Image (tube, rainbow, N blue to C red):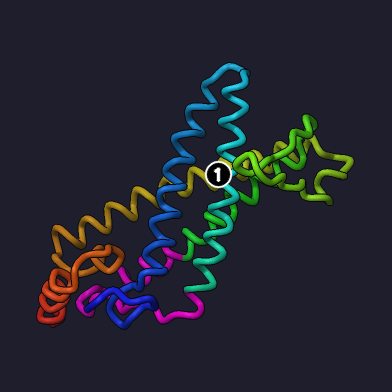
Amino acid sequence: MALTIRNSEYRYGIIAVLLHWLIALCVIGLFIVGSIMEDMKPSLQQFELYQLHKSFGILVLALTVLRLGWRVANPQPSLPPAMPAWQQLAARTTHWAFYGLLLAAPLAGWAMVSASSLNIPTVLFGLVELPHIGVIASSADKQALEGTFSELHELAANGLLALFIVHVGAALYHHVKLGDSVLLKMLPISRAAFDERLARELNNKG
């Protein structure tokens, strides 16, 4: 089953694979940069890390919107036929929860920055200034809004971390323990390697 541009019945296409791994790498980087900058004393270096964190957060927002659009326009590969119904439901629920949190975390961060009394501009990758959200920036109750959006941003980030751990664990379980094609559907591996795993999966469907 060759890796194509669009998704197939059994495997994700190259666009879905690229978006998946780009988002994953950005999110991992956001967690690393976020933990580092929060432990730093106020400095130019900390300010630059904040700008980098915000830049990649907006990039994740844009990539997630693209990925959602691509998902709507493409059929999703089928899950292993031997997978119990509750696991299939859990897999689909986890995917949609990921999308929700990948949108919520950067949006809450953007809203938090817009509500900040410091009024520090966000310059994406040092190139383009991201405007504040007007209705929030002009609110008379910005301090309360900043606190609320800060909590929402943290909750969404923690939710992403928890889902990430569960997602990785489930993928490894399917690959190592069950020997099906779940993990390989999202990897740019050779056709022969994927077809071998898929054949084993279909033969064990009963």
Q: Amino acid at mark 1?
A: Leu
Give the residues in magenta.
71-95
Where in the figure is residue 83, as x and y percent of width and height? 24, 73
Q: Is residue 89 magenta?
A: yes
Drawn side of residue 39 relative to residue 24, left or right:
right
Closer to the camera in the image, 57 or 136 = 57
Q: Is residue 198 left or right of residue 161?
A: left
Give the camera-side residue of 26 and 78: 26
In the rendered image, the vertical position of residue 76 relative to residue 29, given as above or below:
below
Quick check: 87 left or right of 93? left
**Image x and y of residue 156, in percent:** 54, 48
Whole-percent x, y for residue 11 in the image? 29, 75
> Does the magenta portion include 3?
no
> Which residue shows up at 35% across the image and 73% down it?
13
User: Residue at point 27% right, 79% down?
Assistant: 10
Classify 193 as above or below 7.
above
Whether residue 163 is visible, yes or no, is: yes
Secondary structure state at the residue bearing disc 1: helix
Local crowd at mark 1 within 10 Å, few (<14), some, or many (≥20)? some
Q: At 42% across and 43% down in the image, what residue appears?
A: 28
Which quadrant of the structure image shows residue 40?
A: top right
50 or 183: nearer the viewer:
50
Any part of residue 90 in sight: no
* Quadrant showing the C terminus: bottom left
Residue identifier under label 1: 155
